[in-house]
Amino acid sequence: MSMGKVIFYLFVILAVGAGVYSYRYSEKVYRFYLLTYYEKYRKATPEDLAAEARKLYEEKKFPELKRYCERALVVFPKNAELNRLLGHACLHTGEIERGARLLLGSLDRTKPNTRELFTAIEVLYRNRLFTDLVIELARFPFSDDMMLTFMFGVAQFHLDRHDEADRWLRRSQVLGNTDGEVSFYRGTIAERAGRDNQALEQFLAAYRGKPRNQVYRDSLFRLYKKIGRYADAARLSRRESIR
């Protein structure tokens, strides 16, 4: 074992030992020893630590990266690059939600890395954390991104903010989103608001895009019966072509 590691582990042992007095005191002592280790012994700057963390990231050593960043952030808790890399480490080691929040917290509010913003927001979306998604995404410019506007619209839908949901889902369509899911959500919003003609237009678009999707088929079938178009409902049930 190198002398540097020996000294570091001695620092850690002393810091942990301080816990017999109090947790808060030991936390301060732990930070003091880490600060001494990095700044006095290694003479390392936050940039140096971030560079070492990036090397671990590039080598895909995610458990090591996680431990390294957590340790470095005790000393430099506001370093955006260390927080960003810890976020990636968490995403790869099973702490999905924590990773997403760390990534979001590390991004530039005016010019975020679009790929990383999408990665973090998609985690919130897939875990149905819709309130968090709306709060977090609203802090960034996203109105020109087809998928971010879609996820924002769906989140608003599940929060029962249907006017806002429809606005953002429509924006996603304008940006080129032709997936049946966006049409299905817009159709559902329109039907609940009593706009059956608009709902029919959207349900048809969803069905024609994915005619084997049972949810889309059932929604269209129900609406046909609701508005008295029984012949179309019958054709749909027989899987015949529809107008």
Image (cartoon, rainbow, N blue to C red):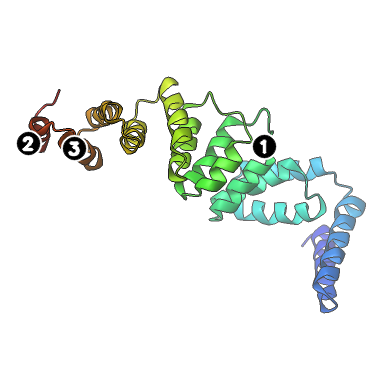
In terms of depth relative to the viewer, which is nearer, 107 or 31? Answer: 107
- Residue at image position (53%, 56%) is 94
Residue 50, position as x, y percentages in the image: 75, 43
SS class, disc 2 = loop
Q: Which residue is mark 1?
A: 107
Label annotation for residue 226: 3
**Residue situated furthest right in the rendering:** 40
> Distance of mark 2 from mark 3, alpha carbons?
18 Å
Circles 2, 1 touching at the beta carbon (< 8 Å):
no
Q: Amino acid at mark 1?
A: Leu
Q: CA distance from mark 3 to mark 1?
A: 48 Å
- Where residue 135 sits, quadrant-wise, is top right
Q: Is residue 130 left or right of residue 11?
A: left
Residue appearing at x 43%, y 31% in the figure? 166
At which x and y percent is residue 148? 50, 32
Q: Amino acid at mark 2?
A: Arg
Is 90 left or right of 47, judged from the image as shown? left
Q: Earlier in the sequence, mark 3 or mark 1?
A: 1
Q: Residue furthest front?
A: 194
Number of callouts in the render? 3
In this rendering, the answer to whether 63 lies above or below 204 is below
Q: Amino acid at mark 3?
A: Lys
Disc 3, disc 1: CB below 8 Å?
no
Residue 11: name its quadrant: bottom right
